Amino acid sequence: MMEKGRLFLIPVTLGEINPLEVLPISVKKVIEVVDHYIVENEKSARRFIKSIHPGKSQPSLQLSTLNKFTEPSELPTFLKPCHEGTHVGLMSEAGVPGVADPGSQIVAMAHEQGIRVQPLVGPSSILMAMMSSGMNGQSFAFNGYLPIDKHDRRKRIKQLESLSLRENQSQALIETPYRNNKLIEELLTTLHPETRLCIACDITLPTEYIRTFSVKKWKQSIPDIHKRPALFIIHA
Amino acid sequence: MMEKGRLFLIPVTLGEINPLEVLPISVKKVIEVVDHYIVENEKSARRFIKSIHPGKSQPSLQLSTLNKFTEPSELPTFLKPCHEGTHVGLMSEAGVPGVADPGSQIVAMAHEQGIRVQPLVGPSSILMAMMSSGMNGQSFAFNGYLPIDKHDRRKRIKQLESLSLRENQSQALIETPYRNNKLIEELLTTLHPETRLCIACDITLPTEYIRTFSVKKWKQSIPDIHKRPALFIIHA
């Protein structure tokens, strides 16, 4: 029986930086041999492949797009090459695939179909913010986005704060970058003055900014991180 | 005023593998210039530094040990070099520091003292298992170890399963490697047959094994992962 191809989980950079500063050589080696990709954004995926492997032939690449507009009925065809013995790479738009992106659907499908899933090492803003927060790393949760509705948002912030206090669990969340400053304002007015807040933005980039202070202390000097990719972690 | 030294969060490998297969060149570059380290285990830290940078002088290294036996009163001296303008590196025994190890205490102290915390990219078994699980990556929690007491363990497993169902949140946990097989047995007898379980072990190593199946399917063929480092993730 022919051996199946693997599904490689391929990380990309978190912004404009030389890829080999933040990715091990194994990522370059995998890209060398893989021609089939499932990507969140075709343009940024092609740019990334070119940046880490300028010699690779772009016309021979076969890219399928997996994002919120992808029809579920398309998914099964994405893994077809694996059944024909060909490796497939999964790539998110930034950082590692399979967390905080739609990639996990494909990973789940790979397991169901007996395709080996092999993760590669790369930058994850969630994990790197968590490492750098100085908060409880024995118990932490990533919660994605807050609700949009103002009243629901406030309630959710309060809920995450209580959860953190009750379970001694650090609570991470993200926001669309152009709403970062608004979120900071909401966090500072909603959370208890002694609750700690980590603001981590532009992780791995030259402009990286990572600080953890109490809400009380943050109020003395509020950072402007408008449109910069950021992670927020709270611990009561 | 003299600029303070930084606290670099330096990842190491997850087992016997060439470091540059899983770590970017920036880790080697930081080790080139840093002589002061805070480490979980002195012996493995020296071995790691030697493996990634064979030319580095070992006698000139200054290592402070931070593990569960370290007195809290010793901690403030560990960051003294930063106040004298010298960089300090923090290293766990495996993977990234600051999560699932005692390192977060030092990171918290660095923030309080205005020392810049800079994370480097490397392998994290928690994150890599999460990426590879195919479970909900928009909401997940890492819960560390289960309680030791048999009744409390069962209760905790049930609690994590309900939490996962209620919040659509993937729940990750770890176990001391020689108790892995026992934990799998407990998970398979305690969880609902349709609950999905990811078993991820020897991540990044040649013996890597990562699979996600329903509890019902796992019962048909139970893997032996005795003494192999592993992560477990459940999703109801």
Image: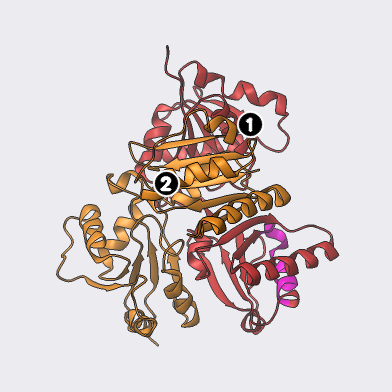
Chain colours: A orange, B red
Residue that mark 2 sits on: A180
Task: Tell me the crowding category of disc 1: few under 14, some 14 to 19, or many 20 or more residues within 10 angstroms, Cα based.
Answer: some
Please provide percent x and percent y for residue A9: 40, 64
In the rendered structure, find residue A232 and report the number of the disc placed on it. none
| Amino acid type, label 2 | Asn
Chain ID, mark 1: B
Measured along the vertical axis of the image, is residue B103 above or below residue A53? above
Dot 1 lies on which element? Answer: strand
Furthest residue in direction bottom, as rendered: A1
Chain ID, mark 2: A
| Left/right of residue B87 with respect to residue A45 in the rendered view | right
Determine which quarter of the picture holds residue B178.
bottom right
Measured along the vertical axis of the image, is residue B124 above or below residue B226? above
- What range of the chain is rendered magenta? B174-188
| Amino acid type, label 1 | Thr
Please provide percent x and percent y for residue B103: 60, 38
- The count of marks equals 2
Q: What is the CA distance from the residue labelled 2 to the residue labelled 1?
A: 38 Å
Dot 2 lies on which element? Answer: helix
Question: Does the magenta run of residues contain B79?
Answer: no
As rendered, which of B64 and A15 lies closer to the eye? A15
Measured along the vertical axis of the image, is residue B194 above or below residue B103? below
Determine which quarter of the picture holds residue A103.
bottom left
Question: Does the magenta run of residues contain B187?
Answer: yes
The C terminus of chain B lies in quadrant: bottom right
Please provide percent x and percent y for residue A168: 69, 48
Furthest residue in direction top, as rendered: B1
| Left/right of residue A98 with respect to residue B25 in the rendered view | right
In the rendered structure, find residue B65 and report the number of the disc placed on it. 1
